[in-house]
Amino acid sequence: MKGFGMHSIEKAGWIEKERPKCGALDAIIRPIVLAPCSSDNHLLHGGFGERKELILGHESVGEIVEVGNLVNNFKTGDMVVVPCTTPNWLAENVQGEYNAHDEGLMKSFKFLGSKDGTFAEYFHVNQADANLVLLPENVLPEAALMTVDMMSTGFHGVENANVRFGDKVVVIGIGPVGLMAVAGAKLQGAGQLIAIGTRPNCVKIAKEYGATDIVSYKDGDIVKQVIELTKGGADSVIIAGGSGDILRQAVEMTVPGGYISNVNFFDAQDVLSMPTSSWGLGMSDKTIRGGFCPGGARRIRKLLNLVQYGRIDTTKLITHRYNGLSKIEDAFYLMDQKPKDLIKPVVFIN
């Protein structure tokens, strides 16, 4: 089979490999719709260390072409939604609060981490009964596709921010994950909801998802703007973009007793630091959390419920559509170029 991936750092291209083998608990999937993610580009550029001859991709909805003999809930021909994080549910760490770290830091992120991803004619999913969800009949595949990472990650930011009814909430960075954090914060009951970003199309969608105010760094210091708008600071701040200085800014715009939740991938060379005064000399009771996207069927099924019953329209994220497996390359490089009108591209496989 063929797939699109990286031969090594900074060298992308098409790769020929054998079709993956199906274990007794597993499934082999043929993708029907895919999406590239900035994490795929980050990997190519060396952000997670050296990888060689690795097929990229971790966002997919597809058709099952083979299941293992111990799989109970799925059969050949089923259309399924594939979480980007597929834990080993026999690992001890999944019994804790966060299943994304089954065998170590982010080890539940099998695609890109320990095996080939989804940008191929076929790909492998471990422990299918626990890691796959049937595509609901009245949900578009591309709408379901947005739940597997963008929505799941953005909502995890909201979960870790402990957003409650009436809270003043800030989302820093309104790319696709940040936009989902805006939508999730509204669903969770946020009162004032401030989105920080500049791209006009993202600002438009942020407002449609529930942002009450927009802040731009072009208009001055974002901390001062947020404190002025909130009349003192936010209860919760969700970081979905930015570089090393963003943590200090998030802490400073949060009230004592508030929450700072990060779902942004920083670069290895970034240094997160802040004056002790930003954190109230350590006495401010501000909680700082950084979290990776949880996995598993149960989570994605709940997110699909929100799509299925009209609580959220995830297709608002989709700005570019391609057709055919060969177009994965175009969509991937579009993510690298980041044109101003881009939020999220998808590729439909014929």
Image: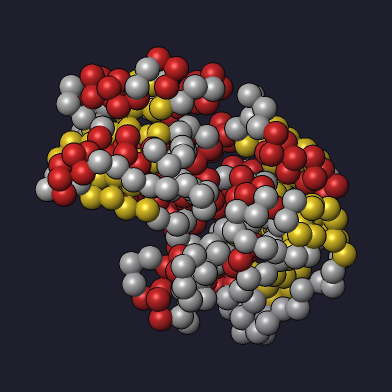
For this orientation, the residue located farthest to the left is 283
Snapshot quadrant of residue 17: bottom right
- Picture residue at 47% right of the left edge, 56% below the top: 293
Name the side, left or right, on which 211 lies relative to 259. right
Q: Is residue 46 visible?
A: yes
Q: Position of residue 157 (x, y in %)?
A: 38, 47
Query: How many numbered badges does the structure rendering display?
Result: 0
Q: Position of residue 247 (x, y in %)?
A: 35, 41
Q: Position of residue 45 (x, y in %)?
A: 67, 50
- Picture residue at 64% right of the left edge, 43% below the top: 142
- Picture residue at 78% right of the left edge, 65% below the top: 53
Q: Is residue 190 visible?
A: no
Q: Nearer the viewer, residue 231 or 266?
A: 266
Q: Is residue 306 above or below residue 26?
A: above
For this orientation, the residue located farthest to the top is 219
Q: Nearer the viewer, residue 290 or 121?
A: 290
- Picture residue at 63% right of the left edge, 71% below the top: 114
Q: Position of residue 344 (x, y in %)?
A: 62, 37
Q: Nearer the viewer, residue 62 or 205?
A: 205
Q: Quadrant of the N terminus?
A: bottom right
Snapshot quadrant of residue 121: bottom right
